Amino acid sequence: MLNYLRKRIVSSALPLVVVIVGVFALARMTGNPASLYLPLNATQQMRDDFTARNGLDQPLLVQMADYFGGVLRLDFGQSLRTGQDAAAMALRAFPATLQLAATTMVLAVLLALVVGCWAALKPNGVADRISSFISMAAASIPDFWLAIVGIWVFAITLGWLPTSGVSGASAWVLPIATLLLRPFGVLVQIVRGSMVSALSEPYIKLARSRGAGEFRVVTRHALRNAAAPALTVAGDLTVGLVNGAVVVETIFGWPGIGKLMIDSILQRDFAVLQAAVLLTAVAIFTLNILIDMGYALLDARVRPVTVKARVRPVAAKA
Amino acid sequence: MTSSSKLPFPAALLKWPALASVAVLGLSGCSVANSDAGASSSNAVRVVLGQEPPTLEACESNLTSTGVVVRSNVTEPLIERNPQTGELEPKLATEWKATGDKEWTLKLREGVKFQDGTPFNAEAAAFTINRAVNSKLGCNVEGYVFGDADLKVKAVDATTLTVTTPEADPILPLRLSFLEVVPTSTSTTEKVREPIGTGPYKIEQWDAGQKITLSTWDGYWGDKPAYAKAEYQWRSESSVRAAMITSGEADVAMGLSPDDNIGDLGVDYPNNETVALRLDANVAPLNDIRVRQAINYAIDKEGIVNSLYQGKHKVAAQLVPQGIVGHNDALKGWPFDLDKAKSLVAEAKAAGVDTSKQISLVVRSAQFPKITELGQVLQEQLSQAGLNVKLKMLETSQHLTYQVRPFAKDDGAVALMTQHGNQAGDAAFTVDQYMLSTGAQSYFGTPEFDAMIKKADAASGDERKKDFEEVFAYQNDKVVQFAHISHQTGIIGKAKSVNYTPNSSSGDELRVSEMTPAS
């Protein structure tokens, strides 16, 4: 397993460098940020001073070499906008997004498991149709619209929740509900599909014939095999949450990395944008490795050969 | 979990998400990372802005997002412009007068302290001017107000300051009103995110990304403000800012639009912003004055103001609204006359101008409410007049390459939608940039026009007013670089519990000391 992990980390390093170089070059192709930071009537002398002060007058390759030199010393540069350390700004914003994404994903997976299993018990039954309708709707409602409607209904009309902000537990509800819908909708479909096929397997029939209760059959036998595809998709959806976070954080004033990224893009705040992208990319690579390992633990067929099959503890008699 | 098997499926499963979500929220203790979940104090006024200030550095306070928090709350200038009357009033300086061709002498207020306890005196005033205008810091206010000119400052004694300009400058006191005074302990090599000033409020806490709290301090030289604290949050969506007023989460919300459903909690105020098209008269077909006149006739300004802005904006005839020194009351907006526009275009065509050449109508997305619709309306109306117009919606940074020299090259003539706000109150801040042939935001001019502007710039008093009025009239008669559309109206949201009357500079300088609780 360690060997496998090492290989994965090495193979992730190259795309990481490509991401950084890409963001670095693309950001600078959008032009000189001087006009955004200087008064509109600034003289050419002031523009030249600004450009030189921020090293933007150097050739792109020199700028990039400087940047990578800094990264190796863990110096990610300064924000043009705030004058603060870019890495500090990204690191400060990251946990808020992580909390939001993790909570959302855990809830989305659990809810999808319940609804998906419920739908799979009787394919084409009433429950299946209801859940299918709910999941399709959830996966296709635009998050921006839902957020605004949510604020209008729950904060203004009913007064149950705050419109936005981060004070108190109630502030979590609308952002999470907004962010949750899409992954939930997609996952319900996946869980239902894999559960339907798992429940028709011979070993399920065998378990039932031995008199196992329905709950035990679904959770112990079928779900174990049906969970792997859902887990993989959940991983991909978590990556997609970064996009959703931009919208949700912007609307709800959530102090996370999505909002920081969008502000940095609009403000051409190169150093902060690079730090935020780098941090997010590392997080996504880490997540992907974790998913692959989880998948390997769940499903013997994709297990790397170095992993020894674990002896399963004997289940306690109920 | 063996007891789960006693529950009918799926009820048993329902226990899991509930437990898990409690666990996840429990882990985080319900508080968001990098946030302070403290409740606001009862004697605080809660303001919601459109964006977080990038910094509260005093010498950047001409930036709207910085100034709205800092100016006259945390720091104070020597001289203050009254937004209602346009008159200059004493603040940290009690009087000032010209004591030579290029020299001004200011008398300073006694008994004023900075929030760190050090006294305010001529030395601090001189230090402030040197730091903002004569240093290598690259302060925004330097570029905005002073350009490349350096000032000579001298502290004659504790309460007397002389300022000498390289050229005679009749509006130096107005320019000084942009400088927020800081103590001599302030860094001269780096910008300072949290300044010390002489204002009624000091910065208590800044939770980055979250909230800024100001609180009163005992040493203030003037009257104690009604609110002990001011709390600032920010939300990018104006509809969310409006919702925070409606739901009682905020007391004052800046920058709302008519679509935000704020109802009777919205207060309209003239915000000094003027919308116009700037026409590139160097390129065909805009290089013919008849085509530029046709554009002015083709725009139905009344219709735009009434249909897009519910009649709240005013049709504009010049680039500055009433209240700015030099505004010409006699000018009327161009009448809407499509036939006249068509015949002018036809005339130009007959004279050999290629009127079928494409004109790019360059518009900045989300610059102000309904801007996309306005762009579409203008494109339609100019097409009606027989011109070939293509609408280009750009984001801020791209749009700026068209707005400011060196101008972006386009594949044709450019009509740029511009929103100009003159914060300073004097027409010089408008015409030098937009109308001089070498102005940073001007496509072209004429030698006669340049001479007129230079003359107005150097004049003072009533003569200055008259000269600038003539400049605006001449622009409309002989130059026609602009097709003016409207003077805008801003909306702030205000809870019933707060008394506050916004004025034309509220967007740049929101004085908390002017707010009082409604009894």
Image (cartoon, coloured by chain):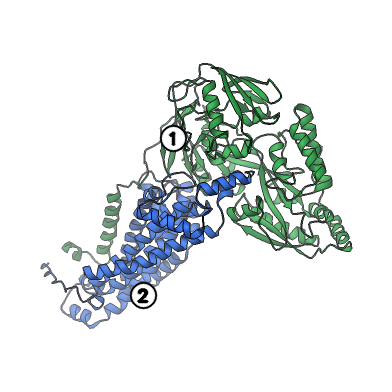
Question: Label 2, label 1: how many angstroms apart (C-alpha)?
Answer: 57 Å
Q: Secondary structure at mark 1?
A: strand
On residue B271, which mark appears? none
Question: Is residue B495 among the parts visible in the rendering?
Answer: no
Q: What colour is chain B?
A: green
Q: What colour is chain A?
A: blue
Q: Secondary structure at mark 2?
A: loop
Question: Is residue A204 among the parts visible in the rendering?
Answer: yes
User: Which amino acid type is shown beneath numbered disc 2?
Assistant: Gly
User: Which amino acid type is shown beneath numbered disc 1?
Assistant: Thr
Q: Are marks 2 and 1 on the same chain?
A: no
* A36 on left or right of A169: right
Across and down, in percent, residue A186 comes to: 39, 68
Task: Kindly identify which residue carries mark 1.
Answer: B213
Q: Residue at x 45, y 54 (%)?
A: A273
Mark 1 closeness class: few <14, some 14–19, many ≥20 residues within 10 Å: many
Task: Kindly identify which residue carries mark 2.
Answer: A125
